Amino acid sequence: MSGRKQEHRQRHVRVAVIGSGFGGLGAAVRLRREGITDFVVLERADSVGGTWRDNSYPGCTCDVPSHLYSFSFAPNPDWPRTFSGQEHIRAYLEHVTDVFRLRPHIRFGREVRMMTWDNDELHWTIETSQETYTADVVVSATGPLSDPKIPDIPGLDGFPGKVFHSARWDHGHELSGQRVAMVGTGASAIQIVPAIQPRVGRLTLFQRTPPWVMPRMDRRITDAERWLHRQLPFTQSVRRGALWGIRELQVSAFTKRPGELGPIEALAKANLAKHVKDPGLRARLTPDYRIGCKRILLSSEYYPAITRPNVDVVTSALAEVRGSTLVAADGSESEADVIVFGTGFHVTDMPIADRVTGADGITLAEAWKDGMQSLRGAAAAGFPNWLSIIGPNTGLGNSSMILMIESQLNYLADYLRQLHILGGRTALAARPAAVAAWNRRVQARMTRTVWNTGCSSWYLDAAGRNTTVWPGTTGEFRRLTREVNLSEYDIVRAPVREEVAG
Ligand SMILES: Cc1cc2nc3c(=O)[nH]c(=O)nc-3n(C[C@H](O)[C@H](O)[C@H](O)COP(=O)(O)OP(=O)(O)OC[C@H]3O[C@@H](n4cnc5c(N)ncnc54)[C@H](O)[C@@H]3O)c2cc1C
């Protein structure tokens, strides 16, 4: 066999997984458990962890308790806190990578630049920043919150100081005594503000819309608890079950009866009143939309931090940068040495969609021009054998994304089983009618949810449609993704190759 052919064969895999966050690593574990070892995990960075590698900003922690925000198949009796910090979650994912022997499958420094479906060969050609692979099946686990978004602000290029996004923290730049502008008041910003406020000279917070903030019941997990979890592993399952159950009970208020969130709103107002005594500031920090419409943020330190004398809250968006002067939309001006953008991610316009070309020769971004939609959050019409982890409408407003990821792994496992049973060179192509029917049901349910009560949030796309959040319980999603319903797919078989005699 010639060298080129040999090389080509080496680079064909049964499954290519893109990304090595919770989604990609979970997929890799699941593939091995299903007896599939012919796979690669392609990761653009040089280590695993995804979200928990990239978000190393001061104060970064999860906002779902650690015993629920972890894999059910890899419980960790040693979580140090009820809401553990980024470094511990990252270490957990490194540990999972080692324990499940995933490293031989992972190819770091491989940014996937283009994936193209081949209708004749029934495989994907995957061009990376290094080599090209072909794969029968692609599992896209590139993350819903992995590509930072920085707004296009006039004059930003001419800013003489330092500029970075919360998900790309510049640890080489010392903030002590500096005038720092924090743009945004989302989940990352409210963790960053209390972490940096004591050491910066001046902190100017640009708030376009105030968030609802509830106290975070964080505490150290005691040695006795950890001992108990190690000695009697079922106690971890009980703990996880309780954390899960409480959140499942909250779902109907979010998805069917937003009015029931009124008492929670009253608690959030009381939390604000407890920490912010100045009525003027309190008014500026009080949201004018139903709690839950945007993600409810958890912090016991945010309000105390913004009442400190070195913090200014500008209740307006950053509109323009003139040298080191920052001009807000309300015309107010402030000086800064550093601008930190806590302005979120490309969620409904995820860059990976521009990099996938399906069976009809169009990209996923083009197929989704009227909004993202996939069958059971996984399979888009026109993209055979391409499944996403955390695809459209699989996000959660109140619980752990790991629950949704594990449901999607069940679906992936059954998908691969079905392909194996069908045998030969076969692909499953989601029927457009099935995708549309699924999406219609999801969108019909969306109308009653709190996320559609009139606020603007990153859950909504440019047309105002919620293509990100799942409007049900995680239990329901688990049931709906337990197995692949073949009637929702066309079975595509490769054309039989004519044998050439002689
Ligand atoms: C600061 C922060 C806090 C969060 N806290 C919580 C929480 O408390 N609870 C919760 O449920 N969820 C939380 N989330 C959501 C979180 O993103 C998910 O829970 C989960 O980590 C997503 O895992 P993932 O593997 O799908 O994506 P990611 O962790 O984002 O991993 C995606 C991976 O794909 C790689 N990748 C992307 N594009 C390419 C490409 N073209 N080629 C190769 N590799 C690529 C990336 O480098 C990355 O490693 C948080 C998110 C953020 C940003």
Image (cartoon, helix red, strand yellow):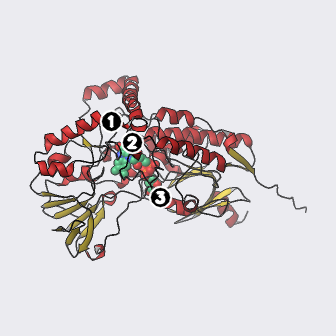
Separation (CA) of disc 1 from disc 3: 31 Å
The percent coordinates of residue 160 (x first, y second) are: 23, 75
The percent coordinates of residue 492 (x first, y second) are: 73, 50
- Mark 1 highlights which residue? 261
The disc labelled 2 sits on which kind of residue?
Val
The percent coordinates of residue 184 (x first, y second) are: 28, 57
Above-or-below relation of 419 to 234: below
Instruction: Answer whether labels 2 and 1 touch (C-beta < 8 Å).
Output: yes
In the image, farthest residue toward the left = 309
Quadrant of the image containing the N terminus = bottom right
- Mark 3 highlights which residue? 350
Q: Is residue 358 left or right of residue 241?
A: right
Q: Closer to the camera, 161 or 18? A: 161
**Disc 3 on helix, strand or loop?**
loop
**Which of the 4 quarters of the picture holds residue 82?**
top left
The structure residue drawn at horizontal position 66% and vertical position 48%, both measured from the top left corner, is 433
N-term mark: 3 or 2: 3
Crowd class of label 2 (few under 14; some 14 to 19; many from 20; radius 10 Å): many
**Disc 1 on helix, strand or loop?**
helix
Q: Closer to the camera, 137 or 362? A: 362
Separation (CA) of disc 2 from disc 1: 9 Å
The mark closer to the camera, 3 or 2, is 2
**Disc 2 on helix, strand or loop?**
helix
The structure residue drawn at horizontal position 47% and vertical position 37%, both measured from the top left corner, is 472
